[in-house]
Amino acid sequence: MFKKDIPPSNRSKVKSSVQRGLRQKLLETYPGLEPFIEDVMPKKASLEAVKLPERVTLYTIDSTPLFFQPIDGPPVPHLRLIHQYPSAIPTIQIDRGAIRFVLSGATLMAPGLTSPGGRLPDAENAIEAGQIVAVKAEGKEEVCLVGMLKVGTEEIKSKGKGVVMDEGHYLGDGLWRMHLD
Amino acid sequence: MEESGPEPARQVVYCGVCTLPPEYCEFGGTAKKCEEWLKDNESDLWDKLYSEDALNANLSTLSVSAQERAAKDAAKKEAKAAANEARDSERKAASKVIIKRVERNKRKYVTVVIGLEVFGLENKKIAKDLGKKFATGSSVTRSPAGIEEITVQGDVSDDLSDWLLEVHGNKIPEANIEFVEDKKKKKSEAALP
């Protein structure tokens, strides 16, 4: 989604009513974020919206990116936020061989998850298609990719091939490198 | 603020060279520099990531052919990053910031600045700053050739170069600033003799 560098663009303050709505939406999408919401997005902080290409809006507080939202999708937390609160969002794991492809912006494919190095949640904790997940890498602690699953985890297990995540926000992409000051 | 939550936010160290978390430096294309940076700044982490054991553990999980491919890929990426950097610095050395004094009317001038963006400065911000500094109108305009330039009202070319060197001197070497005077040719030449 953000393969290219993002040119600096206009930012604007978000209305407090919109901010409340966003906060609600964020909590709905990520119940795991509930305990941290006061730290992530204090009620009084003034949220700013930055327009990104492809009709994506990035929300920041004091020049720290929090999450971005495509016009037709749910909000997705910025990787820096996930690094701070890794437990807030469901996580899957890819094997070591897939890291270099992910970090150069390739789509995420199923074999990287089903191989021995990868990890998917159990059947009872299955993640549905359309949910936002964070992707960790084998042998690493930090999350390297975040995005929307195109297929549910159970289907990934049964099929074992094909695209799993089309485009996401990965370490070192345009959004990651973007300067906000 | 951070400690008020039930589970405080984790503080993640990011590499000063490639901005990734250090464990991912090996995929960033500047692995060597990253390693040196980490050794200088975060020696604990360096011990953890670059000790012999850690390196061996990393290698043993991949098959030999995959390892070779990954190594080749990494080398390629590194070469590319190095080439990029070299090209960038070369371009910086070759390009100049041009400060132009343009005659607008007999005794009125505007100052035009071209070529700041090559040195990593943002035209729009600089224009705003200049307007504040000199208390004049200052705007970013697109020249007919399609290049962005800053137009400052009034003849401020000398002060402008001083200001540039003072505030952004670390980015622009003095030798790369050039003055040009643009006069309306017909009238001035006719008036001179």
Image (tube, rainbow, N blue to C red):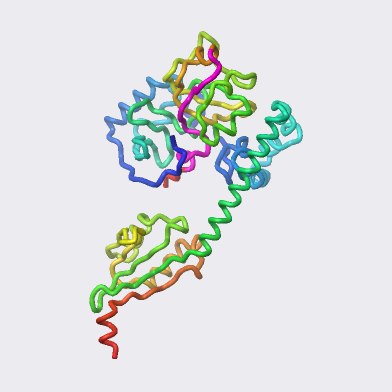
Residue B132 picture location, percent across and down: 32, 61
Q: Nearer the viewer, residue A146 or A162?
A: A162
> Residue at (30%, 59%) from the top-left corner?
B141
Looking at the image, residue A38 sits to the left or right of residue B13; the answer is left
Q: Nearer the viewer, residue A45 or B26?
A: B26
- Residue farthest to the left? B105
What span is in magenta? A159-177
Q: Is A59 placed above or below B188 here?
A: above
Which quadrant of the view contains residue A33?
A: top left
Residue B14 picture location, percent across and down: 57, 40
- Whether the magenta-drawn stretch holds residue A163 is answered as yes
Looking at the image, residue B108 sits to the left or right of residue B122; the answer is left
Residue A23 picture location, percent across and down: 35, 26
Residue A84 in view (yes/no): no
Q: Is B127 placed above or below A154 here?
A: below
- Whether the magenta-drawn stretch holds residue A138 is answered as no
**Quarter of the figure with the N terminus of chain B:** top left
Q: Nearer the viewer, residue B38 or A176?
A: A176
- Residue farthest to the top? A124
> Residue at (39%, 33%) from the top-left corner?
A68
**Quarter of the figure with the C terminus of chain B:** bottom left
Residue B92 picture location, percent across and down: 51, 61
Looking at the image, residue A51 sits to the left or right of residue B191; the answer is right
Q: Nearer the viewer, residue B132 or A160?
A: A160
> Residue at (68%, 44%) from the top-left corner?
B39
Q: Is B67 placed above or below B135 here?
A: above
